[in-house]
């Protein structure tokens, strides 16, 4: 199982209560902002593709649902 899939299933996050963040600057080298009820997996995937990554998903990272990209 991929690490991102494992992280996504390890903790449930209430997406309704997550405040959206700007998505232009990376939180770390592969994660760009928080996912929310208005910024989901499809938006994350599009953002990552625009930044020349192969894939992107909303995953739980540091107890928050973040948009993280992979090469």
Image: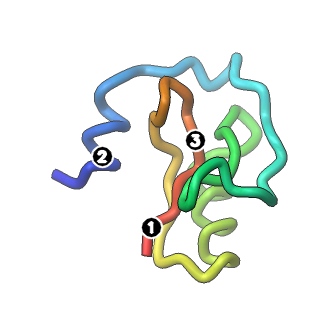
In this rendering, which labeled residue sits more in front, label 2 or label 1?
1
Secondary structure at numbered mark 2: helix
Secondary structure at numbered mark 3: strand
Q: CA distance from mark 3 to mark 1?
A: 13 Å
Please give the label number shown on residue 5: 2
Please give the label number shown on residue 13: none
> Is 38 on the left or on the right of 6, as rendered?
right
Where does label 3 land, which residue?
66
Which quadrant holds residue 47? bottom right
Secondary structure at numbered mark 1: strand
The colouring scheme, among rainbow, by chain, secondary structure or one colour, is rainbow
> Is 11 on the left or on the right of 55, as rendered?
left
Residue displayed at 63% across by 45% down: 40
Please determine whether, in this image, residue 58 is positioned above or below residue 63: below
Where does label 1 land, which residue?
70
Q: How many numbered discs, if any?
A: 3
Q: Residue furthest bottom?
A: 52
> Is 57 on the left or on the right of 7, as rendered?
right
Viewer-closest of 66 and 46: 66
Residue 8 place in picture, x, y as percent: 37, 37
Please determine whether, in this image, residue 52 is positioned above or below residue 16: below
Viewer-closest of 41 and 7: 7
Q: CA distance from mark 2 to mark 1?
A: 12 Å
Q: Earlier in the sequence, mark 3 or mark 2?
A: 2
Residue 52 place in picture, x, y as percent: 60, 82
Q: Earlier in the sequence, mark 2 or mark 1?
A: 2
Residue displayed at 76% across by 39% down: 38
Please determine whether, in this image, residue 46 is positioned above or below residue 20: below
């Amino acid at each position: 199982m991929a690490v991102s899939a494992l992280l996504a299933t390890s903790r449930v996050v209430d997406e309704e209560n997550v405040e959206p963040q700007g998505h232009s600057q990376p939180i770390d080298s592969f994660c760009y902002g928080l996912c929310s009820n208005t910024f989901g997996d499809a938006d994350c995937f599009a953002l990552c593709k625009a930044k020349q990554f192969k894939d992107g998903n909303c995953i739980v990272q540091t107890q928050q649902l973040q948009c993280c990209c992979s090469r």
